[in-house]
């Protein structure tokens, strides 16, 4: 009986030790490592902004002095050259997730090594600004926690994809939680594979629940306008919606 109790006691202590170690690992991965990765991603954004040039930088947005016209169906895509696999080619800005300074780098491709560096554009989906569906993925927890608050995005929220040529402005319309094999959300007409697209859409995907990956959290958005990069973003477009009355 004594040996049995001793064995149970040792097993209990081991379980507690393992639990503490797992907790420390989570704190390390989602805390310290996330800060380091987040700073690295911010550096990539800053470097890409310098390459793009134009009036927008990492600080507050600037007013637009040139009148802007609505985009027609014949507008050119936001990037004239298809990026190479692994190429950093765009910046995603979602003020709901952190105000006017929230910005994440977007790479071409969704391999694990690319998603460890930021967000990834699904190869085979449309480019920003094209008719069809531009789809982007990112980790929710880990690797900088880029989309940890994706569930905070609300219908009407601004989502801007910045490329060398232009700012593509979209607004969120709805979200859906799906199984990991629901690839139809990436179709040119989201959730309607085989249909010919006539509109410009944006689909953002991440894991669900927040610290798991058994499902996918999908945000769908519709195109609003294309703003030439040299024109700059209008003041207030990236204002944090959470601060509005």
Image (cartoon, rainbow, N blue to C red):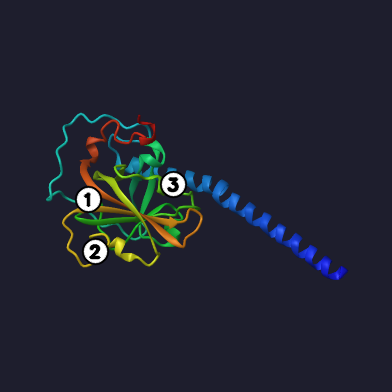
Taking the image as shown, residue 208 lies to the left or right of residue 202, namely right
For the point 24% across and 64% down, the residue is 192
Taking the image as shown, residue 148 lies to the left or right of residue 9, namely left
C-beta proximity under 8 Å, tags 1 and 3: no
Q: CA distance from mark 1 to mark 3?
A: 25 Å
Q: CA distance from mark 3 to mark 2?
A: 27 Å
> Which numbered marker is on residue 129?
1
User: Camera-side residue: 37 or 191?
Assistant: 191
Q: CA distance from mark 2 to mark 1?
A: 20 Å
- Give the residue pinned by disc 3: 149
> Which numbered marker is on residue 49?
none
In this view, the residue farthest toward the right is 2
Q: Quadrant of residue 203?
A: bottom left
Question: Depth-wise, is mark 1 or mark 3 nearer the camera?
Answer: 3
For the point 31% across and 35% down, the residue is 56
For the point 31% across and 59% down, the residue is 84
Quadrant where the image shows the N terminus: bottom right
Disc 2 is placed on an element classified as: loop
Q: Residues within 10 Å of mark 3 (few under 14, many from 20)?
A: some
Q: Is residue 153 visible?
A: yes
User: Camera-side residue: 187 or 163?
Assistant: 187
Mark positioned earlier in the residue sequence (2 or 1): 1
Question: Where's residue 145, x and y in %?
Answer: 48, 49
> Which numbered marker is on residue 192?
2
Disc 3 is placed on an element classified as: loop
User: Camera-side residue: 96 or 90?
Assistant: 96
Q: Is residue 163 visible?
A: no
């Amino acid at each position: 009986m004594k040996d049995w109790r001793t064995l149970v006691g040792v097993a209990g202590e081991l379980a507690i030790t393992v639990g503490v170690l797992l907790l420390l690992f989570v704190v390390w991965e989602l805390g310290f490592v996330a800060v380091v990765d987040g700073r690295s991603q911010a550096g990539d954004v800053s470097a890409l902004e310098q390459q793009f040039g134009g009036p927008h930088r990492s600080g507050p947005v600037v007013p637009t002095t040139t009148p802007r016209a609505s985009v027609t169906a014949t507008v050119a895509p936001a990037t004239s050259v298809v990026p190479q696999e692994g190429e950093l080619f765009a910046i995603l800005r979602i003020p709901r997730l952190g105000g006017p300074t929230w910005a994440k780098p977007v790479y071409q491709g969704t391999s694990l090594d690319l998603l460890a560096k930021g967000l990834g554009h699904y190869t085979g989906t449309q480019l920003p600004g094209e008719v069809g569906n531009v789809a982007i993925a990112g980790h929710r927890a880990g690797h900088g926690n880029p989309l940890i608050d994706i569930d905070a995005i609300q219908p009407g929220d601004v989502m801007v994809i910045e490329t060398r040529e232009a700012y593509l402005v979209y607004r969120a319309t709805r979200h859906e939680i799906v199984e990991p094999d629901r690839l139809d959300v990436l179709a040119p007409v989201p959730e309607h594979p085989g249909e010919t697209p006539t509109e410009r859409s944006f689909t953002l995907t991440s894991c669900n629940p927040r610290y798991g990956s058994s499902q996918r959290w999908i945000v769908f958005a519709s195109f609003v306008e294309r703003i030439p990069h040299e024109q700059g973003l209008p003041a207030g477009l990236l204002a944090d919606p959470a601060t509005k009355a």
